Amino acid sequence: MSAKQYEILALTMRYWFVLLIFYIFARSLFSTVRYLRNVKLADESTGNIPFVLVLFSLTAFILLSLKGQLDVLTLLMGILVCSTFLFQYLLLCYLFSGMDRYLLLMVDTLCIVGFVVLQRLQPTLAFRQVEWFGLGSIFLLLTILYVKYFKYWDKLNYPLMVVGLGVLILTLAIGKEIGGAKNWIQIWKYNVQPSEFVKIILVLVLSADLKENKSRLRRLPVLLFTALVILLVVLQKDLGAAFLYFCVFVFLYYTATSDWLVAAGASFLAFIGAVISYHLFGHVRTRIAAWYNPWADVENRGYQIAQSLIAIASGGWVGLGLGLGSPHVIPASKTDFIFAAICEEMGIITGVFIIGLYMLIMIRGVAIALKAQKPGDMLLAMGATISLAIQSFTIIGGVIKMIPLTGVTMPFVSYGGSSMLVSFGLLGIIQGIAIKNRRKSKDEEAQLRHEGDERYDEQE
Amino acid sequence: MKEMKDTMNKSKIKRNSIGVLLVLTALYLSLIAYFCYAVVFYGSRWFSDSYNSRVKMDETNPRIIPGSIMDRNGVVLAETKEEVVKDPTTGKSERYYFRVYHDKAASVAHVVGFNHSKYGRTGVEAFYVYYLMGYNNSLIEKIYQKAFLPQERGNDVVLTVDFRLQDYITQLLKQQGKKGSVVLLNPKTGEILAMVSYPTFNPNDMDNVDDDSLLNRATQGLYPPGSVFKVVTAAAALENIENIGERKFNCTGAVEFDGTRVQCYKGEAHGEVDLAQALAVSCNTTFSNLGVEIGWKSLLKMGKKFGFNEDFLFSDIRMKMSSLPITYKTSKPEMAWTAIGQGKVLVTPLHMAMIAATIANDGVMMEPKLLYKVVGRNGDTQKQLKASVYRKVLNEESARILKDMMIKVVQEGTGKQAQSGVITVAGKTGTAEEGTKDQQNRNLAWFVGFASVDNPTLAIAVLVEDVGQGETGGTQAAPLAKKVIEKAVELGY
């Protein structure tokens, strides 16, 4: 296909992509509203979202394959993405009837948008990302099983703390520095980001400890643990992770205890810490300055953010068309700044829907937590939800210059194995609770039916 | 027992979870709101930034060649030309595209700017790159061009400036031999008829340009306004002090605030004056007294209404923020200096022209416009200038009084040299001192005003830098303003 023909096709197709994403968003929105209003969830069908998603990924990959010479690999990639997604979705639906299907579909939508953009940016990474998606799905399955069947997870609290602290200290000792932060360690041929995995540990530890009513003094180990992990990631210059841990802690702590004093005290300490690190660390100052006015030093400090904003503005509402922009100009366009790359080629409207999808994921997560039977389960679901929500807010807010940029990945979309695994792990926690809820409500239903039958019998 | 505890615990967690849900939802909604706000208001600026490599013109194999830039009468100021160049070594001929500017482009250089492969983009070439590169075309037009035209073309941009006026003003400033800037606009529509910054450069010869001449003084140059700021102080006085019109002030030539002495020009005592007379003779004593009396709050409020401390988000033009840095901490002497436009007040010439235009236009500030229309491939108008009100700054009564006062300045005050035989002119002169006490002072000459008095169709700001000792706005800037206004009248504006 000649360049001009491709351009015409891509220009036209961008409306189609926006439409499909809009459809998925709208369906999820209606379903979530109904869910919140407590309409029976049990038999809610997901309608044709899986079909629309397949349509989306197939058309996107076909379009990409038509650029220049027909690229069979890209076509195969599209088929691979579709089949992996369908396999994962159908298998999980089959295994766990109580799973929140919409939640999974929204997450898969984000993943597929990520695949498409990665394929456009760097096909080898897209392939690796699909691998990570598969591994992540297995991880999802495992966490669901863990949450669902493993009754004694609070006994593991102290070992988990030790593991968490251990890997962070290890990272600090033998870590590799990539992109300004020393938060990577190399295992075999993969670079792993331990601070990602500590997210799950933090959620598990906090919710196990906070579900009991205890005096503040007896919570000391957990408080100390939180303070230490935050300190360790700050030392690794991973400010995004530090902010994330802190938010998870404050929100979860307040949710569990209604203890304003500790939450406010922690916020105060964090504020002091932020001020100190502003004065102490050059990279913090750089970030703040770049956020405050990226145009003042476009060539150096403000470069990333300026390029991100320029890319977003160039895309306009419906984007430049897949394959027609130049997202390569944006630094870190495959990881932290992938949101800008999406906006450039698929449009600001798509960007808004993506933010909307994250919001719906968060709302459903909280709704699942609200329906949980035990305080521990509630906190577990809340913790995972808060972690995902804050992380996506932090990175998108940073990319659009609403808040200073901190280097966290965009869950489910950014390229990266650790990020993908951990995000699916957090999703698994939420889904596990959802399945538990569902089983419980089914039990109750059965009981009710049983009682009704008995009454009926008596009447006879 | 445990179950009861659990239930209690659960209801507490439930309550708090809903709180967390609300907080997080608010965060997300604000994220979406900010995103849309930023894109709507700043999107075009981000897009036209010179670091946007997407709209860079490729010299050998351009996707789209940028359209032409014309003045309001159709004089072509910038266009894209192509040339076939034969490579002497390989013998292959290649097509080159490059921007060519009008022969006398130096006189519109700051408005039009340049689009250069090495030096980037500025001016209209940068700000309207959206139109010039055809990004505003409809989907059908884009597809048509791709399918049926050998080379895609952007749209032509027609500016509101008149090349003849630009050229005339540039010549005047050249004769005067001083750096400076002149802005002429239509107070009723906000159309910029001329915007000149001197020294200027030749965009056809970008390799020989010194940095100072690249600065567009009209929009990017910040200067102390000096006495022209008194119209703002007077406006604040009119709207905050009752019966100010009937009040008499006694000028003894100087006044002291906490040990700081503010003097009238050459220490001259003006005796008993009313507000209009004080403005006509540009009495520092009276106005610094007034400034202290009005107080920082009211003066700042009036300044903000006029657009000080405000990052203007005009659709057509980018200008630096004029600053009026007064707060509750501002001391009396500082207030006194501020009221007469010294101290830390800074303003751009374009902004000063807008202030004059506001007074001429019965207190309504119009958004300054530089884009007359966008013309498509077939000569179809895609976007046409639409005058829009930026803000109502003054009530009509105050605007009328200020107008009368400014008429008086030209008729019998410091601005006599702006009097013209062909049209009635009103205005205000200013001589500002730039630089700190220990450095050598630079005097700036200002004139802002409008014409004609009954039906203002022209508003002007003239700034001349580095005028000699003893020279003032009345002797340096006012005559220039008169000539420019007369030329504009001659051309039918």
Image (spheres, grey):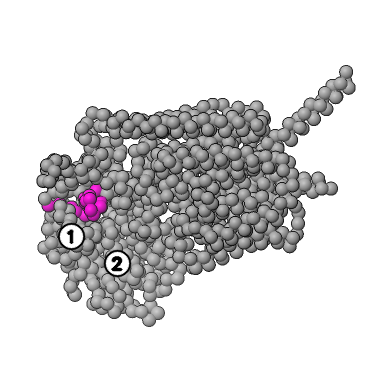
Residue under numbered circle 2: B224
- Going by the numbered disc 1, the residue's amino acid type is Val
Q: Can the viewer see residue A37?
A: yes
The residue carrying pointer 1 sits among few (fewer than 14), some (14 to 19) or many (20 or more) residues within 10 Å by Cα, namely few
- B401 w.r.t. A142: above or below: below
Whether residue A277 is in magenta: the answer is no
Which mark is drawn over residue B209? 1
Counting every numbered tag in the picture gives 2
- B179 w.r.t. B380: above or below: below
- B378 w.r.t. B226: above or below: above
Q: Residue at x 70, y 61 (%)?
A: A220
Position in image of residue A387 (x %, y %): 59, 49
Left-right relation of A238 to B484: right
- Going by the numbered disc 2, the residue's amino acid type is Pro
Q: Residue at x 45, y 71 (%)?
A: B329
Position in image of residue B321 (x %, y %): 34, 59
Q: Quadrant of residue A120?
A: top left
- B405 w.r.t. B392: above or below: below
| Direction top: furthest residue | A460
- Asked which secondary structure carries label 1, the reply is loop
Q: Residue at x 47, y 30 (%)?
A: A79
Magenta stretch in the rendered image = B104-125
The residue carrying pointer 2 sits among few (fewer than 14), some (14 to 19) or many (20 or more) residues within 10 Å by Cα, namely many
Distance from Cα at disc 2 to Cα at disc 1? 27 Å
Whether residue B119 is in magenta: the answer is yes
Q: Can the viewer see residue A257?
A: no
